[in-house]
Image (tube, rainbow, N blue to C red):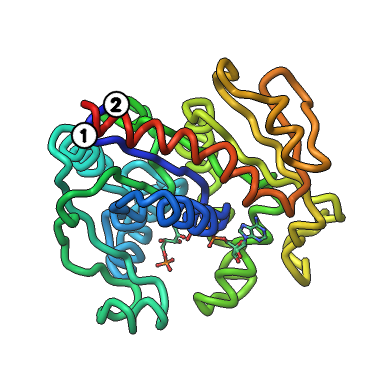
Amino acid sequence: MSKKHPIISVVGSSGAGTSTVKHTFDQIFRREGVKAVSIEGDAFHKFNRKDMKAELDRQYAAGNHGFSHFSYEANELKELERVFREYGETGAGKTRHYVHDDEESERYGVPPGNFTEWAPFEDGSDLLFYEGLHGAVVNDEVNLPQYADLKIGVVPVINLEWIQKIHRDKAKRGYTTEAVTDVILRRMHSYVHCIIPQFTETDINFQRVPVVDTSNPLVARWIPTPDESLVVIRFKNPRGIDFSYLISMIHGSWMSRANSIVIPGGKLDLAMQLILTPMIERLVSESKRA
Ligand SMILES: Nc1ncnc2c1ncn2[C@@H]1O[C@H](COP(=O)(O)OP(=O)(O)OP(=O)(O)O)[C@@H](O)[C@H]1O
Ligand SMILES: O=C(CO)[C@H](O)[C@H](O)COP(=O)(O)O
């Protein structure tokens, strides 16, 4: 944690919706005049696409069938921790981009499946924003949550997460349903051991729950819409959260536990703004005072 150079870490599996949530943060940053620098978690993959394929084949041949992008060892988590620590201490750091598709290739000038060069953050930022797979990992080698001042989990229930991933990977990244299904299966071991433990570290989890039938996510023809879903919002430490204000402002919401509220899916953006704006304001004003 760094009073002077705060870090926000948004964590979710592939397809969970962390990039979508980043848009809401960007709106808050713009409206509140907050200058944020950001990291995409995929920038800290260890391998480009070609080398990852070779490493996967090697791991498979050696009997490690659990190796995937979700595994700790497929990512530069020590480097990510170093960047978090350095930013917290000095407000400086660096990142790069993993280019997934033609659209990103056009933007970054690097072929799909490769990284851009590392580049330093712009000077004079108010906070660092991380969005990706591993921003709250605690293991034998790293402890990322200790550096992050606000940790958010984005965790749709699993059928919905798969539907979101399948649709996005088919529409934007050119994969087939079969290829995405294989990836989901291959990642399951690390999903359990590396991804989900992070959601007990996070301060707030947003869990989208569909209210339409998603029993067979592999054949779903579209992603359930906001109107076809609810969102459970769970606060690790509910002290100081004004639940009655939230319930009165978010029409159709209710408390389901002493630390959780449920909102209509279409109110997610509003709820995030109501909950996160004062938290971000506090982080930035405390950093300016420090
Ligand atoms: N709240 C939501 N309502 C409806 N659709 C959503 C919502 N959140 C995400 N989606 C859809 O799910 C898909 C995946 O979302 P997104 O790209 O944000 O995931 P991600 O977590 O950033 O994935 P990755 O880390 O693999 O890039 C997108 O098609 C997005 O439009
Ligand atoms: O979403 C992902 C992880 O968050 C991607 O699967 C990962 O970045 C690798 O991408 P690709 O399979 O397109 O090379």
Residue 152 in the image: x percent, y percent?
A: 49, 38
The earlier-in-sequence mark between 2 and 1 is 2
Residue density around tag 1, few if under 14, some if 14–19, many if 20 or more, within 10 Å: many
Q: Is residue 100 left or right of residue 189?
A: left
Q: Is residue 188 left or right of residue 159?
A: left
Q: Is residue 84 left or right of residue 285?
A: left
Tell me how many marks there are. Answer: 2
What kind of residue is marked 2?
Answer: Met
**Foreground: 108 or 6?**
6
**Foreground: 38 or 220?**
38
Residue, disc 2: 1
* Res 226 → quadrant: bottom right
* Contact, mark 2 vs mark 1 (Cβ under 8 Å): yes
Q: Is residue 250 left or right of residue 112?
A: right
The residue at the point 33 percent across, 62 percent down is: 52
Is ligand 1 within 8 Å of the beta carbon of the residue shown at mark 2?
no
Helix, strand or loop at label 1? It is: helix
Q: Quadrant of the C terminus?
A: top left
Residue 201 in the image: x percent, y percent?
A: 47, 26
The span from disc 2 to disc 1 (Cα, nearest Å) is 7 Å
**Foreground: 270 or 178?**
270
The residue at the point 63 percent across, 24 percent down is: 242
Task: Say if 106 sits above or below 138 in the image.
Answer: below
- Tell me which image quadrant ligand 2 sits in: bottom left
The residue at the point 41 percent across, 47 percent down is: 63
Residue 79 in the image: x percent, y percent?
A: 20, 43
What kind of residue is marked 1?
Answer: Gly
Residue 62 in the image: x percent, y percent?
A: 35, 49
Helix, strand or loop at label 2? It is: loop
Residue, disc 1: 88
Q: Quadrant of the N terminus?
A: top left
